Image (cartoon, rainbow, N blue to C red):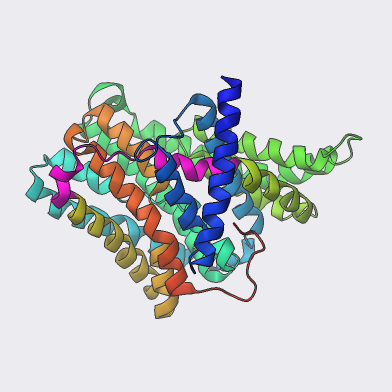
C-alpha cells in the first residue's frame, strides 16, 4: 500500500505541476490546468488515480494550508474596512441561487424539500480555488480580495445555518434531529472563543514556542495553531478552513508572519495542495450523463450566473466599480469541496434525489473549473503578482 501511494504521489505532483505550467503558457491561471488534469487522470477518464484514505488526508491538509496562507496574507485592517461589502456580497450570493434554483427545479419534478436543498447546495461558496487564483494574479491582498474572503466566511455561516434548518424541517434520519438553537449557540461560542484565542493566546503561544531550541520551532508552532483551530471549528460544525483562515490572520499580526508564510508555502504547494486539486476530479463521473443534458445545462447556467449576479450586485451596492464587482462575483462562483460535502449529506438524508446526484456533482465541478478564467478576464494580472506559481 505504501508503494502504491508513492506512485500516486509521484504521478500527482508531476501531472499537476506540468498541467499548471501548460495552463500559464496558454494564458490562463495555473489553477485551471491543475483542476482539469485531476479530471483527466481520475476515474472519469484515465483512471490512473483512485481515492483512498491517505489521499483524502493529503487533500484535506492541502485545502487547510491553502486557507492558512490566505489568512497570513490578509490585511486585517482591509478586512474590517470591507465588512459591509462582505455582508452584501454574501447575502446576494446566497439569496440569488436559492430563488433561481427553486424556480428552475419546478420543471424537473423536484419536491419542495428537494428544490430548497438544491438551492442551498448552490448557495455554498468555496473560495479555496479563488484564493489560489487571486494569489497568482496578485489580487489577494487588495480591498477586492478582502471583501471576497470576508463574504466567503459569512456565506459559509449562512449556508450552514440554513442547511441545519432544512435538515431539521425536511430531512430524515439523524440529520433531521438537528437542534437549531444548540447549533447556533455552538457557532456563536466558536467565534467568541476564536476571537479570544486569536487576540490573546496565539501571540503568546507563538512567541514562547519560538524560543524552543529545536529545528523549525516557529513553523511547528504556526501549524499547531492552524490545525488546532481547524479541529475546533470542525468539532462545532463549522468548516475547518474557517479555523485555519483565522489562524493565519492571528499569526499575521505577529512578527513571525513572514517567516511562517515563507516556510509553509513550499510545504503546501509542493506536496499537499496538488492533492486537493486532483481530488476535485475524483468526484467526476460521466455515466448516464447523456440522459440529463437539460438538467446539466440549466443548473450549470444558474450555478454560474446566480453567484456572478447576486454577489456582483452586492459588491456594486457596496461601492465597487463595475470591473471589481464582476471580478468579485466571479470569485464567488466556485462551489468546490463545500458543495461536494453538502451533496453527500443531501443524498444520505433524502433531500437530494439519487437520480440527480452525479449531475449535481458535475455542476459543482464546472463552477470550479470556470472560476479561474473568469477571474483572469475581469481582474487581469497586477504588477504586484504573487511569486507562487505553477
Quadrant of res 230: top right
> The C terminus is located in which quarter?
bottom right
Quadrant of res 387: bottom right
In the visual, does 48 lie left or right of 256? left
Front one among 326 and 390: 390
Residue 374 visible within the image: yes
Is the residue 68 above or below the residue 142 in the image?
Answer: above
Q: Which residue is drawn at 60% across and 21% down?
A: 2
Give the total number of marks visible in the rendering. Answer: 0
Q: Residue at x 46, y 66 (%)?
A: 84
Is the residue 111 above or below the residue 307 in the image?
Answer: above
Query: Which span of residues is magenta-colored?
Result: 272-295
Farthest residue, direction bottom: 321
Residue 26 on image: x %, y %: 48, 67
> The N terminus is located in which quarter?
top right
Q: Is residue 278 magenta-colored?
A: yes
Is the residue 272 above or below the residue 260 in the image?
Answer: above
Amino acid at each position: 500500500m505504501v508503494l502504491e501511494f508513492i506512485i500516486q504521489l509521484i504521478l500527482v505532483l508531476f501531472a499537476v505541476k506540468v498541467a499548471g505550467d501548460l495552463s500559464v503558457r496558454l494564458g490562463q491561471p495555473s489553477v485551471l490546468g491543475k483542476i482539469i488534469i485531476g479530471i483527466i487522470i481520475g476515474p472519469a477518464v484515465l483512471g490512473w488515480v483512485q481515492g483512498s484514505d491517505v489521499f483524502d488526508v493529503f487533500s484535506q491538509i492541502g485545502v487547510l494550508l491553502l486557507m492558512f496562507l490566505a489568512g497570513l496574507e490578509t490585511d486585517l485592517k482591509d478586512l474590517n474596512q470591507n465588512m459591509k461589502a462582505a455582508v452584501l456580497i454574501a447575502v446576494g450570493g446566497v439569496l440569488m441561487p436559492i430563488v433561481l434554483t427553486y424556480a428552475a427545479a419546478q420543471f424537473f419534478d423536484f419536491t419542495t424539500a428537494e428544490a430548497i436543498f438544491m438551492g442551498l447546495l448552490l448557495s455554498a461558496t468555496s473560495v479555496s480555488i479563488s484564493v489560489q487564483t487571486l494569489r497568482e494574479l496578485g489580487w489577494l491582498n487588495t480591498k477586492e480580495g478582502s471583501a471576497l474572503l470576508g463574504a466567503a466566511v459569512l456565506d459559509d455561516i449562512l449556508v450552514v445555518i440554513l442547511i441545519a434548518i432544512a435538515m431539521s424541517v425536511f430531512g430524515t434520519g439523524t440529520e433531521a434531529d438537528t437542534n437549531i438553537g444548540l447549533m447556533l449557540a455552538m457557532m456563536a461560542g466558536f467565534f467568541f472563543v476564536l476571537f479570544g484565542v486569536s487576540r490573546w493566546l496565539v501571540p503568546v503561544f507563538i512567541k514562547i514556542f519560538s524560543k524552543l531550541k529545536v529545528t523549525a520551532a516557529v513553523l511547528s508552532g504556526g501549524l499547531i495553531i492552524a490545525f488546532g483551530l481547524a479541529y475546533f471549528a470542525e468539532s462545532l460544525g463549522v468548516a475547518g478552513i474557517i479555523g485555519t483562515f483565522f489562524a493565519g490572520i492571528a499569526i499575521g499580526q505577529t512578527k513571525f508572519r513572514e517567516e511562517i508564510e515563507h516556510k509553509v508555502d513550499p510545504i503546501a504547494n509542493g506536496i499537499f495542495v496538488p492533492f486537493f486539486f486532483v481530488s476535485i476530479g475524483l468526484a467526476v463521473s460521466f455515466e448516464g450523463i447523456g440522459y440529463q443534458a437539460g438538467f446539466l445545462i440549466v443548473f450549470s447556467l444558474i450555478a454560474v450566473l446566480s453567484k456572478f449576479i447576486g454577489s456582483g450586485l452586492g459588491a456594486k451596492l457596496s461601492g465597487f466599480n463595475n470591473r471589481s464587482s464582476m471580478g468579485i462575483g466571479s470569485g464567488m462562483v466556485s462551489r468546490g469541496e463545500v458543495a461536494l460535502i453538502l451533496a453527500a449529506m443531501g443524498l444520505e438524508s433524502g433531500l437530494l434525489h439519487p437520480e440527480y446526484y452525479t449531475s449535481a456533482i458535475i455542476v459543482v465541478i464546472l463552477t470550479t473549473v470556470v472560476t479561474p478564467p473568469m477571474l483572469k478576464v475581469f481582474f487581469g494580472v497586477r504588477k504586484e503578482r504573487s511569486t507562487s506559481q505553477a
